[in-house]
Amino acid sequence: MESVEKVRVQVLPDGRLNRANAALYLGRSAKTLAEWGRLGQGPRSFMVGGRRFYMLEDLERFVEGGGA
């Protein structure tokens, strides 16, 4: 049985997470998410004001698909 570790992440009211919080949610480093984005892999992300964000529902879908 796989163990699950609870982590606290900050989710904005509209469901966005910044890269650092998305990385915590996925159990990866922010650098890994940046590299995945560069390679066109990983969960979907988008830019707002020069910052990278991820939607919680996209991260959940990514985890359910076995990507993390």
Image (spheres, rainbow, N blue to C red):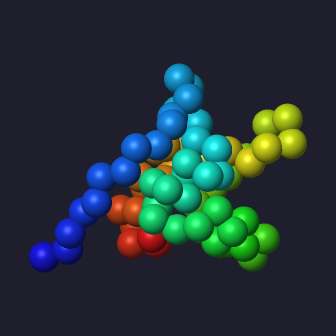
Which residue occupies the foreground of this view, 10 or 60? 10
Rendered residue at 74%/48% (across/down): 52
Where residue 45 appears, as percent x and y from the top left, is: 67, 52
On the rendered image, what quadrant is the C terminus found in?
bottom left
Residue 40 sits above or below residue 6 on the image: below
The picture quadrant where one finds residue 31 is bottom right
Which residue occupies the foreground of this view, 12 or 43? 12
Residue 17 sits above or below residue 36 on the image: above
Rendered residue at 40%/62% (across/down): 63
Where residue 34 appears, as percent x and y from the top left, is: 72, 65
Please indicate whether residue 54 sits to the left or right of residue 60 in the image.
right
Please indicate whether residue 8 sits to the left or right of residue 22 in the image.
left
Q: Let me know if residue 26 appears in the view.
A: yes
Rendered residue at 40%/44% (across/down): 8
On the rendered image, what quadrant is the N terminus found in?
bottom left
Q: Let me know if residue 40 appears in the view.
A: no
